[in-house]
Image: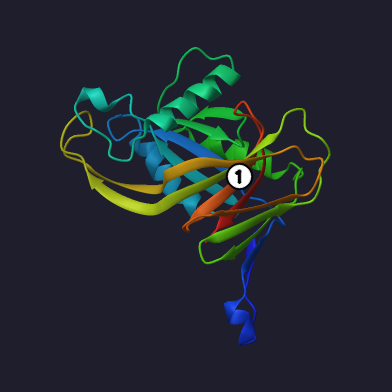
Amino acid sequence: MLRWIRGLALAACFAPMVAEAEEQPVVIELYTSQGCSACPPADELMGRLARMEGVLPLALHVDYWDYIGWKDRFAQPGFTKRQKGYARAAAQRTIYTPQMVVGGVDHVVGNRPLQVMELIDKHRDRADPVALTVLRDGDSLTIQAPAAGAFERPALVQVVEYTPAETVSIERGENAGHTFEYHNIVKTWRTVGEWTGEAPLNLTTTATPPAAIILQRQGPGEIVAAARVD
């Protein structure tokens, strides 16, 4: 489990905070929409996953259901594009909601909790291919990892900023008249660098917590390392 280590001495109160990847969280991406009548059970499941240790659930709201009567204010075209990228990588012709992508490689319908938990257990049992460390000093982050051997293609270093929870009353569309709580709502998902694995990773960037650092094979493909930034 990732830990924030705080110094106890007075001088250490001003030192950077450190996240060490002893056991990396399993990253779960939920592709969802406020305008989708099948999504509320998956959105509720995200709330339970957000309270689990060793799991990093991230909700990416897509925009392709906005036309049916309710515009999802969390939705971004870039999240739809990312979901389409997963579909291409898996040779799938369609995209849908609610969909969960576990560890960047396994796809599952997001309102099937038993299947989701089976995939979480599968990824927890895998050895971490990369030891990731993140040092935070305010909004400044230093991302580090030892050399891991040359990758076939450079891995993407990504920074994800998210909102822990927000409640929304739906006024129109398939979910009209209902109020739902959404969890770990992604605000930004950006690539800040690439890493070949041949040399140690040492990259500095910025993020406003809560956030996550995700190292992922191109495709999008397997997530090789992740760290939470609180």
Above or below for 11 versus 25: below
Structural crowding at the residue carrying mark 1, measured as other residues with C-alpha within 10 Å and reported as few (<14), some (14–19) or many (≥20):
many
- State whether residue 98 appears in this view: no
Looking at the rendered image, the quarter that the N terminus falls into is bottom right
Residue drawn at 15 percent across, 38 percent down:
171
Q: Quadrant of residue 196?
A: top right
State left or right for residue 67 relative to residue 207.
Answer: left
Give the SS element for disc 1: strand
Q: What residue type is labelled 1?
A: Ile
Residue drawn at 60 percent across, 20 percent down:
89
- State whether residue 217 appears in this view: yes
Above or below for 55 versus 171: below
Q: Quadrant of residue 111?
A: top left
- Residue sitting nearer the eye, 88 or 117: 88
Looking at the picture, the colour scheme in use is: rainbow
Residue drawn at 38 percent across, 41 percent down:
43
Q: How many badges with numbers are in the image?
A: 1
What residue is disc 1 on? 214
State left or right for residue 65 relative to residue 190.
Answer: left
Q: Quadrant of residue 13?
A: bottom right
Residue drawn at 77 percent across, 28 percent down:
152
Question: Can you name the residue that lies furthest to the top here?
Answer: 93
Whole-percent x, y for residue 100 in the image? 50, 33
Whole-percent x, y for residue 88 in the image? 55, 17
- Residue sitting nearer the eye, 165 or 156: 156
Whole-percent x, y for residue 201 in the image? 73, 49
Question: Can you name the residue that lies furthest to the bottom here?
Answer: 10
Whole-percent x, y for residue 73 in the image? 28, 39
